[in-house]
Structure formats: C-alpha cells, structure tokens
Image: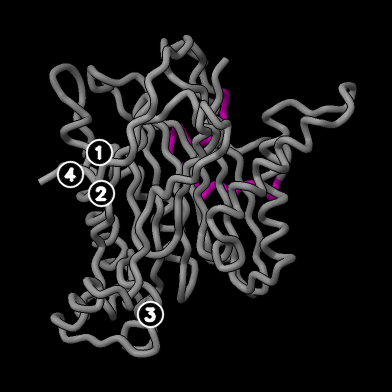
Amino acid sequence: MDLYDELLEPPLAPAPAISPPDARPPHGNPSSKRKAENTDSGSCEDGQQEKKVYKGILWLKAHVAERKGEREEMQDAHTICDLSQDCQPMPADISRLLYFAVFDGHGGSRASRFAAQNLHRNLVKKLPRGEGNSVEKAMKRCILDAFKQTDEDFLKQAASQKPAWKDGTTATCVLVADNILYIANLGDSRALLCRVNEDSQKPAVLSLTKAHNPTQYEERMRIQRAGGNVRDGRVLGVLEVSRSLGDGQFKRMGVINTPDVKRCPLAHSDRFVLLACDGLFKVFSADEAVTFILTNVQEEGSLAENSSPDLDARYESACHRLANEAVRRGAADNVTVILVQIQQQ
C-alpha cells in the first residue's frame, strides 16, 4: 500500500541557491489578509523574519484575497505561515517548513476560525524533531493525527456551548518541506499547481486535491453504512460535503475528519500553487482560473518598461483580480484565494 497518493514527479533540473520565501500575506492592503486570529502562532505574525539561504530550495511567496460575495457573513478563514521556527529542532533532512491553508466554513465562522488557529499548531506538535527523524516517513501520520485532534478539540468546545455550536468547515492545506508539497484536504475546497511544459511552454494544471461529496459512490456507501442517507446531493438533505471538521450532528452519520493526503515534489518549471474555496470554483473551472492568473501576470508585465510592476506585485494583482472576477461572475458564496508564486532567482 502506497504511503501517499503520489503526484507526477517533476522533470530533473539543477536548482540555484535561493532565499526562502516571505510566507506572510502582503503588507499594506487590509483586504488581502485575515485578522490576527487566523494567523496567530508565533511565526505566523507579521514580524520581520530572518532571511537565510538554502541551496536548491525554490523561492515562494503567498498572496491572499478575500471577498464576502453575496453572503452576510465572512465564514472563510485562512492561514499562511512559516513553521520553521516553531518546529525546532528541525528534522535532520529538512531546512524549511511553510504552511498555507484555506477553510470554508458553513453554519457559522467558528469552525473555520478554530481550524485556522489550531490545525498548524497540532501539526507542529506531532512532527518529529532532531537527528534521525524523517519527516518523509512520518508526515502522513502527523497530518492525519493533526486533523483528528483539531476536529475533536473543536467538537468538545462546540458541545459545551448552550446551545451547542453546529458549525463545520472544509480544509485544504499545503505543507511545504523544502521542495516537497504535502497536500491534505477535506471537503470541496481545492488546490492546483501550474506547471509549464518545457518543450511546448504550455501550462498544465495539476489537481492536488480530491473533492469529498456525498454523491460520490464510496462516500455515499460510508454514509449509508453509518445509518445516514443522501438526499438532494447532501447528507440528510442538509450537508453538502461528506468530510469536514466540526459538524458534530453529522459525525454519527458517516461524515469523517480523515483527509486525503498527497505528496508532490516541486519543479523548476512550476509557476504557482492556487488554493481556493468552492466560492471560486463555482464560477471558474480549474483551467480557467490558471489561465486567468497567467494572463494577468503576463499583461501586467507587458506594460511600458517605466511603469511595469515587479513579479511580486503582478502576482498580488492577479490574486485580487481573480477574487474580484469571481464576484463579478455572480459568486454567491464567500471567496478566498491564496496564490503562492514559485520562483527561481
């Protein structure tokens, strides 16, 4: 049995010595980042981070955009942070740990905010430390345990309230260990990788996640075996996803907290990773979203030389334009987009 659902191996090519990313949201734009409650671990704060040079490690930078859409409340949350300082001593075989995650809440915003605050903390607690410990071997179990712990902690808190909270949330997380992506997801938020074919120079879209809907055969069978049912494409006619954090009233009906976990090595031909909730993908296909980003990055770069923004600014602009376009196309749901640019220096 394979340890991970392996994704395509990248083409081999030498990578230069480059700086690790500034994994924080862009400064100076309040609409581009959640408030501190969603990124409040020690290394998730907006304080200045020390720059080091790691040979062969690709440079990453994250940009984020949120839009409420037609909803009265913003129920999405996200986390962007560098976990390297929190995970000390680091395992001997890695030098950098970055974390990006989007959470699409339903029934309220408490589950999504709780997950944004706590899932990465639980992951750090469970990662191996120091010499002789391999993240590669331990990562899947650490991720599964962190999701389980986060869900149990939230359900305990939710049950203690009067009336009990009924919030739930999807989760799509990307953990970057040096140049390896570990992707874990519950529900229907998605992560995509844009990889350019070196021969044709055409972009390819690699899906990093698997949606969990109760209409899928395996998901429906599990729900039915647990005593639940699927009506109108929803669990008990209510819940649109078959795996989630929270949703305590559905946990006895086959809704589980076990994510799909994938592993994907980064390549020098990769351009960006896109994480987004289904508010985006209800009005954009995966190919359309990737093409939209590439087009906007290229158009910004083709402006007159004196006014052409740098690559960081172009990606940030593309991120916000994508969120704006989703709203313009009629996205009734909240829209959260994290765009992680991948770059060699």
Name the residue beneath numbered marker 3. Answer: 239
The structure's colour scheme is one colour
Residue 84 visible in this rendered orientation of the protein: no
Which residue shows up at 89% across the image and 27% down it?
304
CB-based contact (under 8 Å), mark 1 and mark 2:
yes
Q: What residue type is labelled 1?
A: Lys
Name the residue beneath numbered marker 1. Answer: 125
Circle 4 crowding by C-alpha within 10 Å: few under 14, some 14–19, many from 20: some
Which residue shows up at 38% across the image and 77% down it?
166
Of the residues under marks 2 and 3, which one precedes in the sequence? Answer: 2
Q: Which mark is residue 141?
A: 4
Q: Which amino acid does label 2 sit on?
A: Ala
Against 232, residue 340 (above or below) is: above
CB-based contact (under 8 Å), mark 3 and mark 1:
no
Looking at the figure, which quarter contains the C terminus? top right
CB-based contact (under 8 Å), mark 4 and mark 3:
no
Of the residues under marks 1 and 2, which one precedes in the sequence? Answer: 1
Distance, label 4 to label 2, CA atoms, is 8 Å
* Outermost residue, left side: 1
- Residue 272 in which image quadrant: top right
Which residue shows up at 59% across the image and 66% down it?
334
Against 242, residue 124 (above or below) is: above
